[in-house]
Image (cartoon, rainbow, N blue to C red):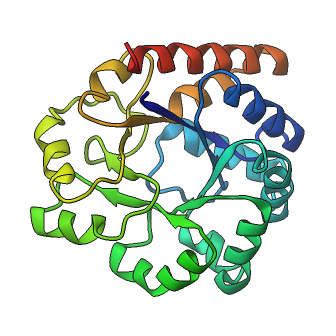
Amino acid sequence: MKKLVAYITSGYPEKSFTVDLALALSENGVDTLELGIPFSDPVADGPLIEKASHKALELGFKFKHLLEISKEIAPKVDTLWMGYFNSFYQQNMDKLVPYASELGVNGFIIPDLPHEEALAYSKLFNSNNISNISFIAPTDSDKRIQEIVKNSKKFIYMVAYTGITGSGNAENLQSFLSSIKRYTNTPTYVGFGVNKDTAKDKVKGADGVIVGSAFMDILLKDEFSYQQKILKCSELAKTIKEKINT
């Protein structure tokens, strides 16, 4: 069974909604939830996630809200925190990582923390059973892929193309996936530009997909009520899960 990871922006449009949405997604095919941490300069995110991030900050999102949301979600859903390193660093990593583990959070996704710099936190992550998700990009050489995946945990985030999230750019991923799988048995999930139309094609040769902008597109539509947003996101999750497994 191929896996579905869903990204949602924490606290948008409000904290209780994030909890309700997360639980609904987990009941409709989502295996792992990425709780995005709103950030003022999300350099790796596409326009939809960036817009939601800015709106969440305007509405008063604070890091403490991520902790409160996680306390309700993490015991019930496989939960990861996705954010830029400054958001984590400001909380004091030595205190934050153990606390994340206490809450039941299983991993961090930090797109702007290079592999070489992440190694400094390996002992901290490992001792608290927190996975620091590794990124692999099409521009990485075989030598670099081998180095990055050597100690990869939980899954490898394979960037489907070079750029930002949410684009529909298509690439032939098969040879790239093969080069990753030569060096590791860690599952490889494809992210960036995955939606209901592209998921079936992009998951070929991979172990799962990561979907963010497609969910955020629904959440940003002001004409939908909270209940409608949750219903439409649940339907989307169910559709994508079926497509990647047929």
* Residue 183 point in image, percent of width and height: 19, 59
- Relative to 222, is 143 above or below? below
Task: Tell me if residue 130 can be seen.
Answer: yes
Disc count in the image?
A: 0
* Residue 85 point in image, percent of width and height: 55, 71
88 or 200, which is in the foreground?
Answer: 200
225 or 201, which is in the foreground?
Answer: 201
* Residue 81 point in image, percent of width and height: 63, 57
Residue name at image x 71 percent, y 67 percent: 101
- Which image quadrant is residue 189 in? top left
Left or right: 181, with 245 as reference point: left
222 or 25, which is in the foreground?
Answer: 25
Dividing the image into 4 quarters, which one contains the C terminus?
A: top left
- Relative to 73, is 20 above or below? above
Left or right: 186, with 204 as reference point: right
Task: Tell me if residue 220 can be seen.
Answer: no
Dividing the image into 4 quarters, which one contains the N terminus?
A: top left
- Relative to 221, is 148 above or below? below
Residue name at image x 27 percent, y 21 percent: 201
Residue name at image x 50 percent, y 20 percent: 241
Residue name at image x 36 percent, y 33 percent: 167
